[in-house]
Image (tube, rainbow, N blue to C red):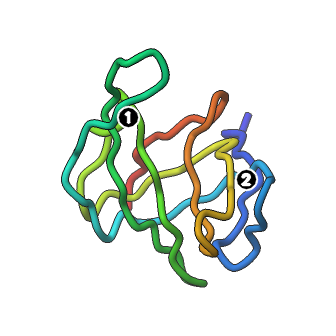
Amino acid sequence: MPESRPPATYVSDLRPNRVATLEGTVVHLEATREILVDGGSTKKVRNARLKDATGEIALTLWGHEVDLVSEGDRVRITDGWVKDYKGRLQISLGRTGKLVKIEP
């Protein structure tokens, strides 16, 4: 049987408050930082830029996710959460999303 692939969405198709599956290249990674979360604990966060043939979107990585990718990696995000943050779209894995590296 052929390998099953999830339906792909392009960056230009993304809309806020929706789940999306897309593939792209990590073109920029900011430094990892720690932020204070509810309850007084801290959590790692790292911002990145993800690019496909139709555009770029901010990618936010949380916790253990910050170490999953490097600049130049091709990745597939399955069931990522798209939201509007300060007037710009961004995607994160949310509660159910998955990120895997794929071959170029």
* Image location of residue 65, percent across then percent down: 38, 34
The circle on residue 20 is 2
Q: Residue at x 68, y 57 (%)?
A: 83
Q: Is residue 11 left or right of residue 41?
A: right
Identity, as a three-letter code, of the amino acid under mark 2: Ala
Q: Which residue is mark 1?
A: 65
Quarter of the figure with residue 50: bottom left
Q: Residue at x 55, y 47 (%)?
A: 92
* Image location of residue 58, percent across then percent down: 48, 65
* Image location of residue 14, percent across then percent down: 73, 68
Q: How dense is the environment of label 2, judged by Cα within 10 Å: few (below 14), some, or many (20 and up)?
A: many
Q: Residue at x 69, y 79 (%)?
A: 12
Q: Is residue 90 left or right of residue 10?
A: left
**Secondary structure found at label 1:** helix
Quarter of the figure with residue 40: top left
| Residue sitting farthest toward the front | 40
**Secondary structure found at label 2:** strand
Q: Residue at x 68, y 71 (%)?
A: 10
Q: Earlier in the sequence, mark 1 or mark 2?
A: 2
Q: Is residue 103 left or right of residue 17?
A: left
